[in-house]
Structures are given as C-alpha cells and as structure tokens.
Amino acid sequence: MTTKENRVSIKKTIGKGYNRFWNNKQFYRVVKGSRGSKKSKNTAINFIHRIMKYKWANLLVVRRYSNTNKQSTYTDLKWAASQLGVAHLFKFNESMPEITYIPTGQKILFRGLDDELKITSITVDVGILCWAWFEEAYQIETESKFRTVVESIRGMYDDPDFFKQITVTFNPWSERHWLKKTFFDEETKEKDTFAITTTFRCNEWLDQVDRDRYEDLYRTNPRRARIVCDGEWGVAEGLVFDNFHVKDFDIQQKIKEIQETAHGMDFGFTNDPTTLPSSVVDLKKKELWIYDEHYEKAMLTADIYNMIVNKGLKESHITADSAEKRLIQELINKGIRRLRASVKGKGSINQGILFIQGFKVYIHPKCEYTIEEFNTYTFQQDKEGKWLNEPIDANNHIIDALRYSLEQYHMGVSDKSKTYKALKSLGL
C-alpha cells in the first residue's frame, strides 16, 4: 500500500460539510443530523481510510440490536471500501459480520447492545481496540448502556499518532434524550467532545426529487421539518402523546404475563408505508406495551401476506384500515382469516387518541419508527399559535394502525368475537 493509494481527497470523496469531522481526534466525535445529511456514509469512508492509515487501529461498530448492523453499518463500510477503490484489500465476512484489513489483519467488528456486558470482553489479535462507532445512537435508551461499551475502549499503544475515539451518529427525535445533555448542552456535556449538526443541504449528491420533498416539509409540517430537514432536537411542546416511555422489556415474558395482544395495520404504497404495530394491552393497570412494528413502502399483497406469516400472526386478530377493503379481502382470501376492517366514523380519530392517552405507553427500543412518531406527532395550531384539539395528519402511520388495533376495547363490546361480529354486521 503506497502513500499515494492511502491519500484521499476530502473534497472529491466526502464533499462539503465534513472536513472538521474527518480530521478530528477528540475522544468523543458526535454528529446529529437530518435525514440525507450523508453522516453514515461519510463515517464509513472515514473509518476505512483510517484503518488503512493507522496499523494499530481496530474498530467496534455498535447498534442497539446486533441484527440491524448487517443491513446498515456493514453494508455502508463495504460500500465505502469500493468508493475508495480498496475493496480488494479487505475480507468481508457477512455471516458474522466482520471485516478484516488483509495486509495487517486489523478488524472491524460488529456488535449489538442486546447484551452490552458481552462487548466488554472483546479482544483483537493485532493492535488495539481503540475506536467505537455508535450508529443510530438515539435507539440506545439509557446512558448506562452506552457507558458500559465506552469503558471497553481502553489501553495505550506506543505510537506518537495513537488516539482513542468514540464516534456517535444519530437523528435527534427528542430533546429529552440523554444524548442532548451528554454531548450538546454546554453546562453538562462531556469534556473533550467535538459535536456538530449536519443537514441535507451539505449533501450535494441528493437528487432534486429528494430535495423538493425535504423543502416541502417546511410547508406541510414545519415542526417536523426542524428535525428531519434541519437536524434540530424535537421539542415536546404540542405533542399529542406525553404518556410514553422507551423501555427495554422481556417481550415473551410480558406476553405470557398479560395474555392480551393487539395488532393493527395501515396501508400505503408509493409515498406512505404499510405499517403493523403489535402491543400487549394491560387493561387492569392501563398499560400499553408496544413490542413490535413493521414499516415499509411499496409492499404488494403477496409481500404483506408473507410479512404477516413471518411474524407468526396468520391466526391473530388484526384490524386494518377500512379504506382498503379490496386489499383486506385479498389478504383474507390468501389465508389471513382474522383480518378485519377498522370501524371509522365521525370523531373516531380523537376517540382513539383519547383512549391511548389513558394508558401508560411503553415502547420497546427496537421499534424505531414508533419512537419517531410518538416524538413528532403534534397538534395543529391556529394563526395565533394556539393549540387545536386536532392532530396534524402526518407521520402517523404507526399510530393510526395502533388506533385500529385498540378499537375493540373502546367500542363498548368487551368480547373480541362479538367485536368482529359487530364489524361484520357493518359490512366492514
């Protein structure tokens, strides 16, 4: 590997907005950014370059759940090696996953915080485990989980260029998250921290369709645009739901304990996703435990059927958006026999919202789209800025499906079978 091969033109390879990030060597290097701000891609390119430059370095890539690494960080790092024209110098083991720099044996390891204590025992054969990248760090619900891994980045190496570093990248959905206090608030942030905010405007490789979509959000939902377009913290003011918490819990134990689950579906295709949230409903304690979600665009009937079957919900009661009766019937014909249409009517949205507001809502940290929606679903405002008792009809595809799933509990019909007989009698 020659010096010439190692040298990377920042301007040509990463574009604008990331020069300080690229060269920074402080212990904490933190980027919160809007969607499309190329923070993940740039981080991947930076680490491939650095692994080749520093022969003592090994990288640990962390996400909240280990199975999400393969489709995100691993793929990004593999892409980065190709972008730099050095993919032939790396061995990519997708099954683990793991990446090895062939000339030296340095490693890029991937782990999840499913069990953070297992991460602390990781060792490497060459050099030292000196860097960690926490991608989508917003999904890490407690600072203590993060600290446990940070403590495993320790030790020294006899090289004047040696440095240890924790890189953190995320979209900022709520100002209440521990990341804000730890890295962005002047009074409480960690020492030796480099923290920046990036937006889609520094991504010169976005096409015009994407740019127009982001810009239009300022018109349709200005509050959400602050987060999605400007990379600013979500503000709790005006939230429809302030009764929710992100909490890790034993899903199977909770299902076994309560023995009452609810499933709902909202349909979309080109612009909107098809969603399916699942929750455990504790009517006695008035607690709602949201434990699973699906969120995907461009799903055909066969795709939706396979998704339901793969989730083990083929025989479960599922309440779906009644606006798509043909799609519902197609799925019933395929074998999803207990799929039924929702009962919509005047005031049904507010009725469903009020019902959810009466619960303590706990969201499992793996449900990232649910967390996002609960943090950005807000009421409308009038011209004087007063809050109206009507939510903005946007960014609510999980929440709509959740409302459908809970109709059976506030329709005045307590028995599930009677509920679905009532639905059938209405022709839904």
Image: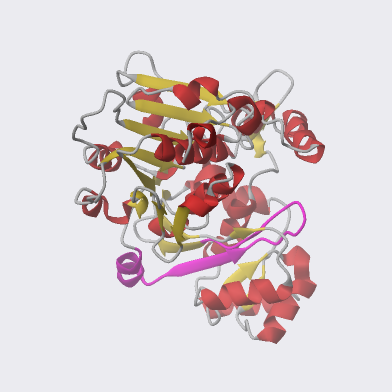
Residue 407 magenta: no
Query: Where is residue 174 drawn, in percent x and y?
Result: 48, 33
Query: Where is residue 94 drawn, in percent x and y?
Result: 46, 63
Residue sitting at 46 percent across and 48 percent down? Answer: 358
Above or below 381: residue 154: below
Residue 260 magenta: yes
Give residue 372's quadrant in the image. Answer: top right
Residue sitting at 58 percent across and 52 percent down? Answer: 399
Q: Let me know if residue 69 appears in the view.
A: no
Query: Where is residue 322 drawn, in percent x and y?
Result: 73, 66
Above or below 139: residue 118: below
Give residue 16's quadrant in the image. Answer: top right
55 with respect to 241 (left or right):
left
Q: Please state the extent of the stretch shown in magenta in the rendering.
A: 251-277
Of residues 218 and 12, the one drawn nearer to the viewer in this rendering:
12
375 with respect to 389 (left or right):
left
Colour scheme in use = secondary structure
Above or below 358: residue 290: below
Of residues 178 and 384, the one drawn nearer to the viewer in this rendering:
178
Of residues 47 and 207, the one drawn nearer to the viewer in this rendering:
47
41 with respect to 301 (left or right):
left
Quadrant of image for the C terminus = bottom right
